[in-house]
Image (spheres, grey):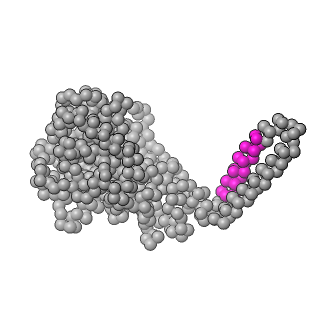
Amino acid sequence: MSDPGCLRLPLSVYPGMSRFVLDWLGGDQRFLKRGPAADRSEWRRPAPELVAALEGSNRAWGLEVGDQLKAWASGETVTIVAGQQVGFGGGPLYTLAKVATLLKMKRELQALGKRVTAFFWLATEDHDLDEVAQLSVPGDLELIHLRATGARRSRRAVGPMPVPESLITELKTLFPEAGGVWLRPGVNFRDSFAALLGSVIGSELILIDSLLPELRRAGQPLFTKVFQRWEVIQATLQKRSLELEDAGYTPQVGARESGGHTLFFEIDDRGDRNIIETPRTIAPERTSTSALTRPLLQDFVLQPDVFVGGPAEVSYYAQLAPLHELLQIRVPSVALRGHLLLATRGMLRFIDRYGIDPVAIFSSPDAMLEVLKPEAVASVKREAAEGKKELMRRIERIGDLALPADHALARAINRSIGHIEYHFSKLTERAIKGIVRKDRERYSAARDLVTALRPDGKVQDRVAGWFPFWCRHGRYLIDRMVEEVDPDADTFKVIAI
């Protein structure tokens, strides 16, 4: 490892990485093109009402973005966009990785003399309350899960819902220094997320509420077109899903049991989202997009040049590509967000010193350290295998001698063989653990590494919240992530903070 503060690994090592994304990064463009977006010959000036609403909502969150919006509205800028659910406390670490990717791309384009507008789309219309009403805090040996007491499943869009007081109380118990408007009594998930993010990154990004009425009205022509071509769109999605399956991939969004894909929801007077089964005319403010139509609305209204997404969002675009053409929506260049995991310098020195296999980082301390004692471990396995083989030979000999006199012995022997194999396996496992745990310092370091990078058996950036890291490191966390993040890369990094 040349840089003691950074470990670069192939994305194929990242647990659970989408095979489609890996193939796409490797050059397979059958379902999703790579490279620059199409020309902007049919770019449309956004409605003044939308521009004003965006400026007003961002000002309410403490961000001054008026000049950026004016430049965007005039068509003078390169437009890049990413987005995320409005999770409590800012959500998991990969949310900040998306932000860092946007900031890195924006600054690199500006260094080339380009004017850039960067939007961050707040997915306030999602109704997964369980997902947003929680925060996982890295602990010494495991994650500490903060969850709202009394929260129940609902179909209500989460953005306007108030953050449960129990969740705020839990957070302040762990982080007494936490405060500000994002934790004020009665604050909703949208305003809490936006105010926190704005306080951390400043006004470099323009935040956009997906439920903003002016945004919905700007999307009315798209909604109408989708309703008019409903059956054709359903058939197109079904065809693309079959094409993906034939290529060995799983479509990111499956059809409902009824056979159709969910395209829109209607938001009722209580704020609940109800699936629209058949096309009909409804007010744009009541129209809520699904996972499949959200990118279409974003691309129709914002007309981005680049969309930055995670593996699932990249896969959405592979499924949606035919609809952009069908609905005459310009397809942005799609870029994969950078993938970053956080560790201490001591952890990275441990990896470097002992030449740990990158795959072993995401296993267990025992499995990781097994490679450091290959001869001893191999000897234990060899002795156990030979011992079991010899014992089995003796049992077989006993059976040959006794079976003519006692045929019932066969059943007893078969039962004994099962017990013996089990205990030999357990004995071998315990012996290997004893070897690798001899060096307590190394075991402790390996345990800390596994706990940090794969807490609760899941990859760090997908479960651990970024806010606890921010409390510890402040602005340095953002600067470090922006410095190290690699947009649209087939590698990921473990960086020291």
Whether the magenta-drawn stretch holds residue 420 is answered as yes
x%, y% of residue 166? 41, 38
Depth check, front residue: 486 or 414: 414
Residue placed farthest to the front in the image? 404
Give the tally of numbered discs: 0
Image point (18%, 31%), residue name: 283
Query: Left or right: where does residue 255 sit relative to residue 73?
Result: right
Residue 316, placed above or below residue 484: above
x%, y% of residue 382? 70, 60
Query: Left or right: where does residue 76 sit relative to residue 340?
Result: left
Depth check, front residue: 173 or 479: 479
Residue 384: quadrant of the picture: bottom right
In the picture, the quarter occupied by the C terminus is bottom left
x%, y% of residue 202? 26, 56
* Residue 184 in view (yes/no): no
Residue placed farthest to the right in the image? 405
Query: Left or right: where does residue 269 sit relative to residue 214?
Result: right
Whether the magenta-drawn stretch holds residue 49 is answered as no
Magenta span of residues: 414-434
Image point (48%, 49%), residue name: 458
x%, y% of residue 78? 18, 57
Depth check, front residue: 134 or 376: 376
Image point (15%, 44%), residue name: 50
Judged by its main secondary structure, the magenta piece is helix
Residue 273, placed above or below residue 111: above
Query: Left or right: where does residue 339 sit relative to residue 213?
Result: right
* Residue 294 in view (yes/no): yes
Image point (54%, 52%), residue name: 141
Depth check, front residue: 405 or 424: 405
Residue 79, placed above or below residue 7: above
